[in-house]
Amino acid sequence: MNTLLREIELRLDALFAQLAEGFDAPPAQRLRLEGLLEAAALLGIATQAELEAVLTERYCAAFSCSPAEDFGAQWQRLFPFPQIPAMQRRAPVVPSTSDDL
């Protein structure tokens, strides 16, 4: 396997693992990874379709479902290549003041 493709897989796994565990992922981490995806496509190391398949496979491994199950069948319109569907889970909201004001 190509070194760049292996690095993309490792970074996808790390990013998705953070999010699956409920942790935040820094935007810089996602943006650098998106740059690697685009570079792999531009250099002809892999096609866009192949990279999207890897992304979907790694997403499924982390979240036990596909991006299509989480974001709908047209998820690629919401996250056009090379964007990564990386969303932190919504934090619980706890009121800080009483309703008696």
Image (tube, grey):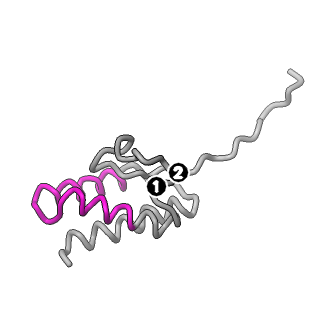
For the stretch drawn in magenta, the main secondary structure is: helix
Q: Amino acid at mark 1?
A: Ala
Disc 2 and disc 1 in contact, CB within 8 angstroms: yes
Residue 62's x, y, as percent?
Answer: 48, 67
Q: Assign the C terminus to one quadrant of the image.
A: top right
Q: In the rendered image of this protein, does residue 95 appear above or below residue 79? A: above
Q: Assign the N terminus to one quadrant of the image.
A: bottom left
Residue 53's x, y, as percent?
Answer: 31, 63
Q: Residue at left 42%, top 67%?
A: 14
Q: Which residue is mark 1?
A: 25
Which structural element holds mark 1?
loop
Question: Residue pushed farthest bottom?
Answer: 1
* Within-10-Å neighbours for mark 2: few <14, some 14–19, many 20+: some
Q: Which residue is mark 2?
A: 88
Residue 19's x, y, as percent?
Answer: 51, 59
Which structural element holds mark 2?
loop
Q: Which residues are magenta?
A: 29-57
